[in-house]
Image: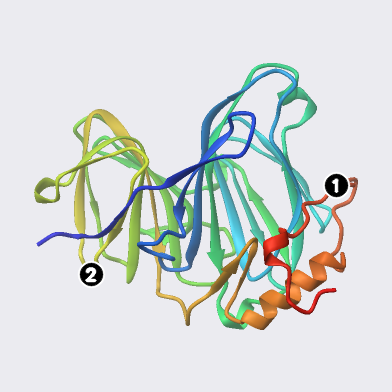
């Protein structure tokens, strides 16, 4: 019996200057996996001298963002006053709660020469009881994340708990987010620890036996309660494992806002238009709400 419930081929978007992202969630086939409502792969991209990442200040509510890099560096600034560079193997976890604003940019050093940027960003919906919590930010260095290695496999526990490893990140619901590296021909069991689980193939190929073979840039959503053994192809494989318990109800995802309440999303739109969110210190730019999303009662 197949363990794969849904196969998602991410759509590619060009954000300008040849900078591409692949969006696996949300998708027509699946809106979320556990609390994960958004999954973007950034790159791999090569940025020419003088060109960098410039995601101007923008708001979030009702979610936590988690950024994980394979190459490059991003400077995070937010309305709490946080200024934090993130590098490969480190993790930025930003809880928006009732509202936060942040920017993501390349710093002066990154812009001065040829640079690369390659990684993933996910959004995790907060439980209804925590949707209006106080915003916060946590950064962990690579040596603060639990790691397990065995039989050609290396697992880094980024957030939550899985396979006996527990990340110190302050998550607010049962979930897991981990990086799994497999050497050529190595196999690993993905147990059914949570109701909703998925595998994102970053690089390499996977042999799933009777389920067939799958390649990079594919999101495999697993059937509930179905463990799965994965085997890497001849070049090895890098995977992201993610999921958690099913959410306490559906979520509205509009622009950068996530909420169980449609009216809360509309209020967030009005607040951003009126600039009632706290600003990011030392930032003067901001991304306006897209015209097609303006609430009906504004102005």
Q: Position of residue 113 (x, y in %)?
A: 70, 16
In this image, 186 relative to 276: left or right?
left
Taking the image as shown, residue 12 lies to the left or right of residue 136, namely: left
Tag of residue 79: none
User: Does dot 2 land on a helix, a strand or a loop?
Assistant: loop
Q: Is residue 129 left or right of residue 228?
A: right
Q: Nearer the viewer, mark 2 or mark 1?
A: 1
**Which residue was labeled with disc 2?**
225
Q: Residue at left 35%, top 48%?
A: 9
Q: What kind of element bears circle 1?
A: loop
Estimate the x, y position of residue 189 in percent, counting from the top left.
22, 52
| Residue that mark 1 sits on | 285
- Is residue 163 at all visible to an observer of this figure? no
CB under 8 Å between discs 2 and 1: no
Left or right for 159, reference 29: right
Q: Which quarter of the image is occupied by the N terminus?
A: bottom left
Indicate the position of residue 185 as horizontal and vertical percent values: 19, 32
CA neighbours of label 2 inside 10 A, class few (<14), some (14 to 19), many (20+): some
Where residue 198 sits, quadrant-wise, is bottom left
- Whole-angstrom CA distance, mark 2 to mark 1, is 47 Å
Residue 135 visible at all: yes
């Amino acid at each position: 019996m197949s363990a794969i419930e849904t196969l998602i081929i991410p759509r590619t978007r060009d954000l300008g200057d040849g900078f591409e992202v692949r969006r696996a969630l949300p998708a027509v086939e699946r809106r979320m996996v556990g609390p994960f409502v958004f999954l973007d792969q950034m790159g791999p991209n090569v940025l020419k001298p003088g060109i960098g990442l410039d995601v101007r200040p923008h708001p979030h509510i009702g979610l936590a963002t988690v950024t994980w890099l394979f190459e490059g560096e991003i400077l995070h600034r937010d309305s709490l006053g946080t200024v934090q560079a993130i590098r490969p193997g480190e993790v930025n976890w930003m809880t928006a709660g009732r509202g936060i604003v942040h920017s993501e940019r390349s710093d002066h050093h990154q812009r001065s020469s040829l640079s690369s940027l390659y990684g993933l960003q996910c959004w995790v919906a907060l439980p209804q009881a925590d949707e209006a919590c106080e915003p916060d930010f946590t950064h962990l260095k690579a040596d603060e994340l639990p790691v397990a290695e065995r039989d050609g496999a290396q697992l880094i526990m980024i957030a939550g708990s899985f396979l006996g490893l527990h990340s110190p990140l302050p998550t607010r619901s049962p979930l897991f987010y981990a990086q799994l590296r497999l050497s050529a021909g190595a196999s690993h069991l993905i147990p059914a620890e949570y109701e909703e689980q998925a595998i994102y193939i970053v690089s390499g190929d996977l042999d799933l036996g009777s389920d067939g073979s799958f390649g990079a840039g594919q999101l495999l959503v697993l059937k509930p309660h179905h463990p799965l053994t994965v085997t890497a192809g001849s070049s090895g494989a890098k995977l992201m494992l993610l999921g958690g318990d099913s959410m306490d109800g559906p979520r509205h995802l509009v622009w950068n806002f996530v909420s169980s309440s449609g009216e809360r999303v509309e209020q967030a739109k009005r607040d951003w238009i009126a600039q009632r969110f706290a600003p990011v210190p030392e930032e003067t730019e901001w991304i306006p709400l897209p015209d097609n999303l303006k609430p009906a009662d504004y102005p």
